[in-house]
Structures are given as C-alpha cells and as structure tokens.
Amino acid sequence: MKSTTTAALALLAASALALPTTTSIQQVTKRQSSSAAAVSSNIAAWQVDIENVNGFLDNAQNAINTNTGYNYPQEASFSLGTVGKACPGPNGCASDGETRFANLKALLPANDTHGQAAVAQLDISIPGVIGNLTAITQASATDITTIQAAINSINDLRCDQVLPAVAQLWYQATIDTETTAGTPASIPAVSGPSACAVIGSATL
Ligand SMILES: *[C@@H]1O[C@H](CO)[C@@H](O)[C@H](O)[C@H]1NC(C)=O
Ligand SMILES: *[C@@H]1O[C@H](CO)[C@@H](O)[C@H](O)[C@H]1NC(C)=O
C-alpha cells in the first residue's frame, strides 16, 4: 500500500516536472496575446460601420414615412460601400464591416465555442443584409414597395441575428485576448437603428 502510494506520487511528480508549469498556468487563465490591439481596433472600426448603416436605415425609413424625396439607391450604395461609390471610408460601410468580421474571425481561437457560435450565425446572416442592401441599390428610386420590403428584411436580420451575434463576438474576442482575468476593460456597445427595439446582449 505504502509503496503503491509512493510510486503514484513519484509518477505525479515526474509528470508535473515534464510540463512547463508557467506556460500551463497561463493557458488555463487567459491567453497571452499580441492580437489584443488588432481585436480592439477592428471592433472600434466595425462600430463606425454599423452606425453608418443604422443611419441609412433611419433616414430611409423617415423619408418613406414622411414621403420626402430621398435617393434610396444612391444612399444604399453609400451605405454598402460598393466599389466605385463614395463611402465615408476608410471605415463606415457595410462592406467595411464584412472586412472587420473577417479579421476578427481570423483572430478568434478555434476552441472559443461562444465566439465560434457568433461567427457561425454571422456567416449565415450577413449575406442577407448585404443582399438586401444591394437590392435597394438596384431598385427604382420610386419603387417604395420593393425598398420598404428590403429595409424590413435588413432590420429583421440585423436586430434579431446580426447585431446580437456581433455583441457576442466582440465580447468573446476581447476576453480571449485579455492577458489578465476579470471584466474586460471596454467593449463598445452595439447599437441598432430606431427599428430595433433592443439589441440582445451577448450570451455568455
Ligand atoms: C483554448 O486553447 C488555448 C490554447 O491551447 C488554451 O490556452 C485555452 O485554455 C483553451 N480554451 C478553452 C475554452 O478550452
Ligand atoms: C433579404 O432578406 C431576406 C430575409 O432574411 C432573405 O430571405 C433574402 O434572401 C434577402 N435577399 C437577398 C437578395 O439577399
């Protein structure tokens, strides 16, 4: 009995010695990361893109509601950041948001299940937003029925799926790259257009 215990302890001691102890401690707390700055700058830029798209959706809806003249296709091109069209760049377009998403996706650890779930949701939902924005760019400026339907689809997708998933991705990507455990310093809030009642918060 005694010798068995001793042998077991010796085995434990040997395996403990075989592991690089400090590295293993860092791994179970927070990933030491040089990508923290890349994560936060992509989040900050993406927030600008989102707010500009919100602005388009609010302005377009107000114009429809008040029957005010508004160049919906052109403003949608602006908001989308279609190549060749002016966009409040270097940030500020839906297509810039796609780039921020691709960047954060590349920075997200594969084993971050909450973060990867947000990525999977965005992979499914973002194309519908881009597709409906594109549909507005191609619509006749007076075809309010088509334009309103596309705006409604964009709002449904963004309010219910895209923006909550963005909030979750921002949270996860930030905590993944924090070097110390605890509440993340600052993660920008995700806001929606007036049509969104409340944007869901991250599912942690
Ligand atoms: C993910 O993998 C990293 C690197 O191996 C590790 O430090 C971290 O603890 C893992 N996270 C989870 C949630 O498993
Ligand atoms: C517009 O959004 C709807 C609702 O999600 C979607 O079914 C449709 O495919 C989208 N349209 C385009 C052109 O992407």
Image (cartoon, helix red, strand yellow):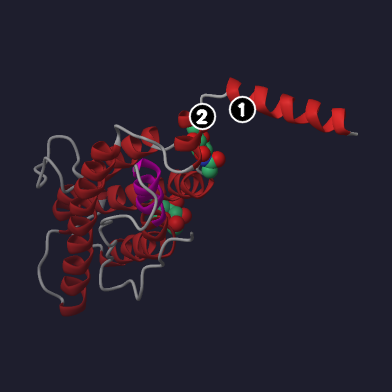
Q: Nearer the viewer, residue 167 or 32?
A: 32
Q: Residue 117 location, x and y as percent?
A: 51, 48
Pointer 2 or 1: first along the chain: 1
Q: Which residue is mark 2?
A: 21
**Residue type marked 1:** Ala
Q: Nearer the viewer, residue 22 or 147?
A: 22
Residue range highlighted in magenta: 168-178
Q: Which of the labelled discs sits on residue 16, or is there none?
A: 1
Q: In the image, is residue 159 above or below residue 7?
A: below
Residue at 28% from the left image edge and 39% from the top image edge: 36
Residue extending farthest to the front is 2
Residue 145's quadrant in the figure?
A: bottom left
Residue at 25% from the left image edge and 62% from the top image edge: 143
* The N terminus - image quarter: top right
The Cα–Cα distance between marks 2 and 1, rounded to whole angstroms, is 8 Å
Residue 189's quadrant in the figure?
A: bottom left
Residue 42's quadrant in the figure?
A: top left
Give the secondary structure at mark 1: helix
Instruction: Reply yes or no: does residue 126 show up in magenta.
Output: no
Q: Residues within 10 Å of mark 1 (few under 14, many from 20)?
A: few
**Residue 111 shows in this picture:** no
Tag 2 and tag 1, C-beta contact below 8 Å? yes
Give the secondary structure at mark 2: helix
Our reading of the magenta stretch's main secondary structure is helix
Q: Residue 105 location, x and y as percent?
A: 39, 37
Q: In the image, is residue 10 above or below residue 85?
A: above
Residue extending farthest to the right is 1
Q: Residue 44 location, x and y as percent?
A: 20, 49
